[in-house]
Image: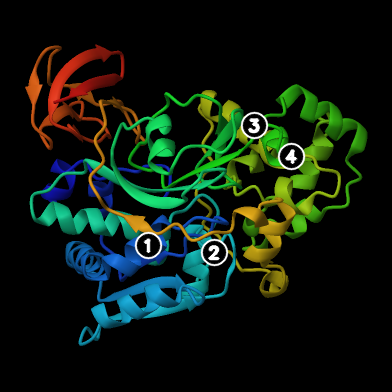
């Protein structure tokens, strides 16, 4: 749909893939991903509770665009209020149904989700479309519904949790600083703290409150500066490799619990760890299999009894392979999930305890009140693809929703719009700073 492209919609729950590409695909089924599998995450749950009709409208629009005859909303059984709202929204729509998931991590991974809903396995190097399925996050479907009304993406729903006085979910302008959203949540309880940008398992650590909310960010977790999870996530790669060489016992737990391995992919993290000591004799296939890693983080946060990080090693190898132009070719062989998969799903509650985050298990209710911000800094490369090109100049006066950056000609990309009314204060590389009126 042209309106999806014009609205600047990118995947709200993942890496930020431009959504207009998916709308141009042909599929048998569209799955609305409402699993929100990260522990403590609540933005999608709140959205499904408050705006189920918009999510279902977005789903119907995407089904129409892709020619899909069936729509499925995948949501965890424990999201009772969300299920109630969605059930009402699909009444009379015979081609849409709910699929209730067990509460495990990572239920929201699209490879895992497709297998749960359809029983089909996406083979190595392929995408859900290879199985006739398009997967789209519920937040993205909300934005598609808005786009049909001519409303571009200017705001993001984000939960602010942890060491804050009033945990809540807010609808804030894209480009709002972390300092501002923490202030909306009543401020931090601590003088010194760290922030995990995204969920506690896959998110990254920052100490910089001037960083900003983008179109894909659904959660900001504020933790004590010296929390064990912060220590794990900020450990240097060189130190991790030294620890692996001295402490890895080759127990293979990282492999036995790896979602990709359980789906039948040839990814065995313990063998990649072993290759750090025996790299010269390791099979090249072992090293390149790191490209199959989803980065879910179960290996480092739950599986490894020594507190090592196979994920960090895999991500570094993936990045190096990408720099060298390596691409894991899609497999023509039909993958088959391993029979033990059903018994090795990690319960979210158990993972939460392992992470030491039980104290932060609070409801973060949705507050859609307008919050005044003095300025926004909008990153023009929040998506997969080439950075957007500014179409405004410093000093220009803008209204909320005005186009500020466009897709480079002939390249994969996304558009960006002013998230507040005001004046363009600065254009600095791939960032546009708008001073609010």
Q: Tell me the quadrant of the picture where the C terminus can be found.
A: top left
Q: CA distance from mark 3 to mark 1?
A: 37 Å
Residue at the spot of label 4: 228
Spot occupied by residue 166 in the image (x, y as percentages of width and height) = 46, 49
Give the camera-side residue of 218 and 313: 218
Give the camera-side residue of 342 and 184: 184
What is the crowding at mark 3: few (fewer than 14 residues within 10 Å), some, or many (at least 20)?
Answer: some
Q: Which colour scheme appears in the figure?
A: rainbow
Q: Which mark is residue 317?
A: 3
What is the crowding at mark 4: few (fewer than 14 residues within 10 Å), some, or many (at least 20)?
Answer: few
Residue at the spot of label 2: 107
Q: Is residue 287 left or right of residue 182?
A: right
- In terms of sequence position, does the residue under pointer 4 or pointer 3 come before the other? 4
Residue at the spot of label 1: 46
Residue 379 drawn above or below residue 188: above
Residue 104 drawn above or below residue 421: below
Q: Nearer the viewer, mark 3 or mark 1?
A: 1
Q: Nearer the viewer, mark 1 or mark 2?
A: 1
């Amino acid at each position: 749909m042209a309106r999806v492209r014009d609205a600047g919609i990118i995947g709200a729950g993942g890496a930020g893939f431009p959504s207009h590409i998916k709308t141009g695909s042909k599929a048998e089924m569209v799955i609305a991903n409402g699993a929100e599998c990260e522990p403590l995450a609540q933005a999608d749950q709140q959205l499904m509770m408050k705006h189920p009709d918009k999510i279902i409208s977005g789903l119907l629009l995407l089904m129409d665009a892709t020619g899909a005859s069936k729509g499925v909303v995948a949501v965890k059984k424990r999201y009772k209020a969300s299920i109630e709202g969605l059930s009402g929204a699909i009444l009379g729509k015979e081609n849409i149904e709910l699929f209730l998931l067990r509460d495990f991590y990572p239920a929201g991974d699209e490879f895992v989700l497709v297998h749960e809903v359809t029983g089909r396995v996406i083979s190595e190097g392929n995408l859900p479309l290879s199985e006739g399925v398009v997967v789209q996050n519920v937040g993205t479907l909300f934005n598609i519904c808005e786009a049909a009304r001519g409303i571009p993406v200017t705001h993001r729903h984000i939960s602010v949790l942890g060491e804050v006085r009033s945990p809540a979910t807010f609808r804030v302008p894209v480009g709002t600083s972390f300092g501002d959203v923490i202030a909306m949540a009543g401020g931090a309880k601590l003088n010194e703290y760290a922030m995990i940008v995204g969920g506690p398992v896959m998110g990254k650590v920052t100490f910089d409150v001037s960083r900003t909310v983008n179109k894909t960010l659904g959660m900001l977790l504020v933790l004590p500066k010296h929390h064990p999870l912060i220590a794990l996530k900020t450990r240097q790669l060189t130190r991790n490799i030294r620890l692996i060489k001295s402490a890895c016992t080759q127990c293979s737990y990282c492999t036995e619990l790896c979602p990709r391995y359980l789906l039948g992919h040839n990814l065995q993290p313990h063998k990649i760890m072993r290759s750090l000591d025996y790299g010269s004799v390791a099979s090249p296939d072992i090293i390149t299999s790191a490209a199959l890693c989803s980065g879910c983080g179960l290996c480092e946060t739950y599986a490894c009894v020594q507190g090592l990080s196979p994920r960090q090693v895999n991500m570094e190898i993936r990045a190096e392979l990408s720099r060298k132009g390596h691409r894991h070719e899609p497999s023509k062989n039909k993958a088959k999930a391993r029979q033990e998969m059903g018994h090795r799903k990690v319960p979210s509650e158990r993972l939460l305890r392992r992470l030491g985050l039980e104290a932060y298990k609070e409801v973060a209710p949705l507050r859609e009140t307008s919050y005044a911000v003095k300025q926004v800094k909008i990153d023009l490369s929040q998506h997969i693809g080439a950075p957007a090109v500014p179409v405004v100049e410093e000093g220009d006066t803008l209204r909320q929703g005005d186009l500020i950056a466009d897709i480079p000609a002939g390249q994969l990309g996304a558009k960006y719009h002013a998230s507040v009314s005001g004046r363009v204060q600065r254009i600095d590389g791939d960032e546009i700073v708008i001073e609010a009126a």
